Image: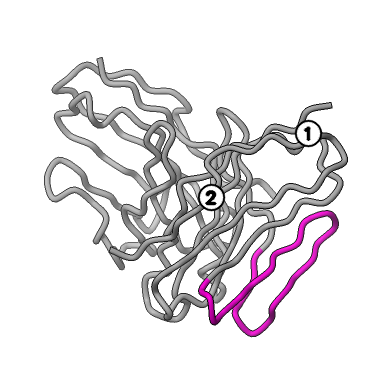
């Protein structure tokens, strides 16, 4: 089964610090890698996404780094705030393959403490 | 522009009853995906539909589960003869053509089977 492995399971960061969440994948056909943010009782919200033709993408305080040869990608949250406390999921899919089903990591629960 | 809508938000059923979950995609989106999230787990793909067509149901359990997306009206995920193991959050996502990998999620339906 195609897998996306996410780490760490939980993360505690001081306010103003950098939060880093890592994901690794197996299927080299994956070509779209989104990150989702989920608050308790809510649906996942699309945060930022990257394709393998770039090594980094930045949107505000959120940055995705992508290492195609290592089959790894990571989310960096700069200047982390208590409002960033949520569960973050990485995902991957093969676009243009007919299904577009997202394969998700198991999630990282981020707590940003004041 | 309203987001993906799901109802009911919470559903309680006794073992053996039927559960019907509804999903209305975002305006202009013609592709719908259903995912299931077990407690403390990531989301698992179930089924991908277009209007009047099931494109990929590889993640659906073989028995008791069915899905449809009629020409008019919302997409329906139907679970017959529910069992306690069906208790989970069920999320619907929709995507705009042609960028089907960019999926926007609804708030989910939390199903509890007693």
Q: Position of residue A31 (x, y in %)?
A: 51, 77
Say few, some or many: other residues with alpha carbon within 10 Å of mark 1 (under 14 / 14 to 19 / 20 or more): few
Q: On the picture, is A6 further left or further right than B70?
A: right
Q: Is residue A71 above or below residue A87?
A: below
Above/below status of A67 relative to B33: below
Magenta segment: A49-71
Q: Nearer the viewer, mark 1 or mark 2?
A: 2
Q: Quadrant of residue A46?
A: bottom right
Residue A83's label in the rendered image is 1
Residue A97 locus on image (x, y percent):
39, 79
Q: Residue at x 43, y 79 (%)?
A: A28
Q: Quadrant of the C terminus of chain B?
A: top left
The relative height of residue A11 versus residue A34 in the rendered view (above or below) is: above
B12 lies left or right of A35: left
Mark 2: secondary structure: strand
Instruction: Identify the residue shown where x is 73% and y is 56%.
Output: A76
User: What mark, if any, has residue A7 been given in the picture?
Assistant: 2
> Considering depth in this image, is A112 or A48 the residue closer to the camera?
A112
Above or below, comparing residue B41 to residue B72 in the picture: above
Task: In this rendered view, identify the residue nearer to me: A53 or B10.
Answer: A53
Q: Residue at x 64, y 85 (%)?
A: A53
Q: Are marks 1 and 2 on the same chain?
A: yes
Residue A49 placement: quadrant: bottom right
**Residue B31 locus on image (x, y percent):** 45, 63
Q: Residue at x 81, y 42 (%)?
A: A80
- Along the line of sight, the residue nearer the viewer: B54 or A70: A70
Query: Is A100 within the magenta?
Result: no
Structural distance between the alpha carbons of marks 1 and 2: 21 Å
Secondary structure beneath label 1: helix
Instruction: Answer left or right for A92 relative to A80.
Output: left
Whichever of labels 1 and 2 marks the residue nearer the N terminus, that label is 2
User: Chain for mark 1?
Assistant: A
């Amino acid at each position: 089964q195609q897998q996306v492995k996410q780490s760490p399971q939980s993360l505690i960061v001081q306010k103003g610090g950098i939060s880093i969440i890592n994901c690794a994948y197996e299927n080299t056909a994956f070509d779209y890698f989104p990150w989702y943010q989920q608050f308790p009782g809510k649906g996942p919200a699309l945060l930022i996404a990257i394709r393998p033709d770039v090594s980094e993408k930045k949107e505000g305080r959120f940055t995705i780094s992508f290492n195609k040869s290592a089959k790894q990608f990571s989310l960096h949250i700069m200047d982390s705030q208590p409002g960033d406390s949520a569960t973050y999921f990485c995902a991957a899919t093969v676009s243009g393959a007919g299904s577009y089903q997202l394969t998700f990591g198991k999630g990282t629960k981020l707590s940003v403490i004041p | 522009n309203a987001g993906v809508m799901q109802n009911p938000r919470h559903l309680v059923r006794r073992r053996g009853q039927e559960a019907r979950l509804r999903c209305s995609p975002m305006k202009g989106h013609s592709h719908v995906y259903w995912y299931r999230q077990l407690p403390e787990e990531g989301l698992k793909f179930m089924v991908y539909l277009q209007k009047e067509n099931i494109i990929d149901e590889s993640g659906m359990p073989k028995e008791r589960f069915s899905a449809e997306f009629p020409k008019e009206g919302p997409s329906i995920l139907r679970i017959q003869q529910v069992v306690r193991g069906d208790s989970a959050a069920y999320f619907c996502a929709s995507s705009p053509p042609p960028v089907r990998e960019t999926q926007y999620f609804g708030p989910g339906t939390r199903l509890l089977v007693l």
